[in-house]
Image (tube, grey):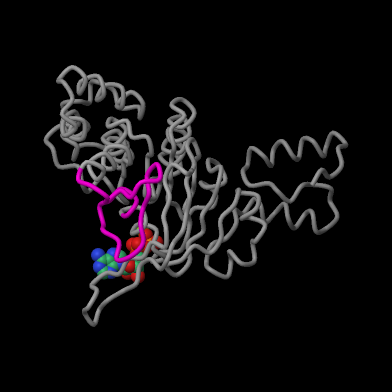
Amino acid sequence: MALLQTENLSYVYGEGTPFCVTALDKVNIEIEKGEIVAVIGQTGSGKSTLMQLLNGLLKPNSGRVLLDGEDIRSSKAKKLETRFRVGLCFQYPEYQLFENTVYEDIAFGPKNMELSEGEVDKRVRDAAKYVGIPDSAFKTHPFDLSGGEKRRVAIAGVISMEPEILILDEPTSGLDPKGREQILSLIKNYRDRTGKTVIVVSHSMNDVAKIASRVIVMYQSKVLMTGTVDEVFEHSEKLREIGLAVPQITEVFSKLHAKGIPVSEKVYTTEQAFLEIKRVLRGGGANA
Ligand SMILES: Nc1ncnc2c1ncn2[C@@H]1O[C@H](COP(=O)(O)OP(=O)(O)O)[C@@H](O)[C@H]1O
Ligand SMILES: [Mg+2]
């Protein structure tokens, strides 16, 4: 049984009005414990809507979300349990920092979980450390932080609830390359250190290649394909058609491969490219 699963999940905004939009149409996905799943797709394909359904923030028009095989809306207790077990960090979460200090913002979630004061404090300190926010910034007003720092405080606010499933909606968008790297490595680190499950929404194929163990591709409110990074990136033509390019480095290697140079086509990151070039220069033949 999958940890988190959807069954024919559909969602319509403004149902019954002339402006209704079908944002999700009979979506079936399965998330296993310990995976880092990337959800990719063009703007408007339904990613954010799906994420808000996964933690019960939105109510499906039809279909179900199952956590440990049980409908997350089956009872009040299950709904509450889901909010705490499935932590969602929204797209542009920095707009939702509303407390007067960094500390209070990170503490907001754990406080709602009715934990002891000591436990809340420990959670805040651990989460802040995790995302690289020093204790000396605790009294700072969130508005006085840089964009990257705000994003990290917002993520700490979700991590401090220690969710079993951490969902991050476009966590790197709008950040500079350094900020992106920091966020990506902290996500990977979270997964590696805790063994918890992570779902990351992204439209950067570079980001996806760096961290995901599996990819779900959304297109026009439906799941178009799902598979490992290798399996999904093999469909580079199809991906391009729906406005998702494979990483540039992958394009380069696939062109080199087509020219008869014995490099693998399955190169998705600069680290892999480096190793592959080293291997070929040492006289290794193609291994893919
Ligand atoms: N609050 C809303 N009211 C009406 N339509 C919405 C709302 N939020 C999203 N939509 C529409 O639902 C569809 C899916 O949106 P969304 O889930 O935000 O996609 P994505 O995250 O992939 O960009 C889009 O057509 C979008 O315009
Ligand atoms: Mg979105």
Q: Is residue 272 left or right of residue 13?
A: right
Residue 72 falls within the magenta-colored stretch: yes
Hey, which residue is sitting farthest left in the picture? 100
Viewer-side residue, 206 vs 8: 8
Viewer-side residue, 192 vs 106: 192
Image quadrant of ligand 1?
bottom left
* Residue drawn at the location 22% of the way across and 48% of the way down: 95
Hey, which residue is sitting farthest bottom in the picture? 18
Viewer-side residue, 175 vs 186: 186
Give residue 180's quadrant in the image. Answer: top left
Give the magenta range: 53-76
Q: Is residue 190 left or right of residue 159?
A: right
Residue 279 falls within the magenta-colored stretch: no
Where residue 102 appears, as percent x and y from the top left, is 19, 31
Viewer-side residue, 41 vs 100: 41
Q: Is residue 142 left or right of residue 236?
A: left
